[in-house]
Image: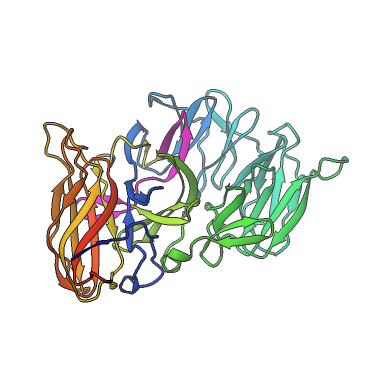
Amino acid sequence: MAWKDVKIDSKLFTNVHETVLRRTNAAIENAFINESGGHSRFPGLVEFADLAGVAPTYLDEWRGDLIAESGSRVYRCDKNGNATDVTGVPVSGDGRTVFQPTDNELCMAKGGPIIRLANEATELLSPDAPESTHLGYVDEFLLAIDKHSGRFFHCDVGDFRTWNPLSVFSANGKPDDLNAMVVTPYREVMLAGVDSIEQFERLTSGSGAPFFRRWSVGEGIIAPYTLFSEDQGTWGINQDFELVRFTGQTSEPRSDEVGKTFEQIDNWAGAWATVVRVVGQKFIILQIPYATNSYGTEGITLLYDFRTKRWYQLFDWDAERAIPKRWPGWSHFRLWGRNFVGGNGKVLELTDTVHTNIGRIQRMLGRTAHIDTWGDSEIINVRARLRRGVGTVNDDPPKFALRVKRDNRIWTKWHEKSLGRAGQKDMMLEFGPMGHAKTWQFEWRVTDDCPVELVALWADVLGAENK
């Protein structure tokens, strides 16, 4: 007999059929790999503010309050979750709401007229401003791309309500319409179309045009709301359906491990991406809300740790069908040192003190590759090291469940062990014998509302002493 390490710290890899995997993980859901190589559960969601209706909710900040747009109406939320409807003029359009603060107001656009919030209620920014999907701000210029064209407009300097029809530039490195814009922390204006990206910068000398084109690159953005700036670069989903990081005139694909998942997405409509800093980690959340996922339900949400270049998956839970479904967020904004998520007619808060999604099950799941390095072998025992003592004194303790698949046949029944009531902190769980096989695959899950830290997993293998 020999104790063998079951590697749980490998990357998630979905670029080949699961049966091909030998070393990488096949599934990591609602969890991530921490700095010590173990699996930590992703935070859950609780309700922060209840708005009207069930429309997707988009978030930003203005003068110390959280701003939420949902169903074309705008709400102002204080730290206690009290929401006030401040809609004077609704935000109209068929896209996602994009926010842009200026010196005087918070501007909003989602494909229709640009709306501003400056005082007690929203109002039209200017009858002369273009209808737009994306806004930007640099050096007292408010920028707006012109829908269905290769042009972007700017207001008069410092006067955000005055728009001259001659204050326009064309991003014409390639003849494709602009679909996205972002201003980087370095005052670079990145303008994207399906086939190209162009970088414009401020021209501060002379009295001529205030912007000039620095360069263009022959790689575009297919999903407009995935364009964002982070980690000294610009990110987005390109026309080859890859997540890429742009720096200068070069790009670096970051989705090779999940490339097949991206290629099989059947609906990229409404795809969005943002950066989330939570539980000491920095992630990119990438959601394709209307795509069919591997469980046959709607919505794919991926979590990317861009420091370690690892991918994970987030899901909600469909209780009626007992299968995962789309993670319930539509947007994210960090304010007051807290992480808020736009839900369906609600503002949610991402918190590590709860591990449900608005009261619904948040299933943490992990699944290894098919291990074949032990040869023809028998497992006498499986041992897991975990954080325990996470339950309460009086309630039934939460459970950690483990099962195995031998020779890619059928899964064994779940073997459940207690994660311990408060004070029961012994870290080791043992699951007993698992049978005989030539290949082994391990899967574990937790569905109870509790934190989970899986440190390591070992198998006592008969027949693998020298392997």
Write the residue at 33% across / 50% down: 39
Tell which of 206 and 313 is nearer to you. 313
Of all residues shown, which one is farthest toward the front? 466
Write the residue at 41% across / 69% down: 15
Q: Quadrant of the N terminus?
A: bottom left
Q: Quarter of the image holding residue 366?
A: bottom left
Rendered view: 307 above or below 256: above
Q: Which x, y percent locates residue 19? A: 30, 73
Q: Which x, y percent locates residue 394? A: 11, 31
Q: Quarter of the image holding residue 381?
A: bottom left
The reply, left or right, for residue 161 in relation to residue 6 is right
Tell which of 270 and 423 is nearer to you. 423
Decide if residue 393 is in sight here: yes
The reply, left or right, for residue 235 in relation to residue 332 is right
Decide if residue 150 is in sight here: no
Report the magenta residues as a range: 315-341
Rendered view: 415 above or below 49: below
Q: Is residue 25 magenta?
A: no
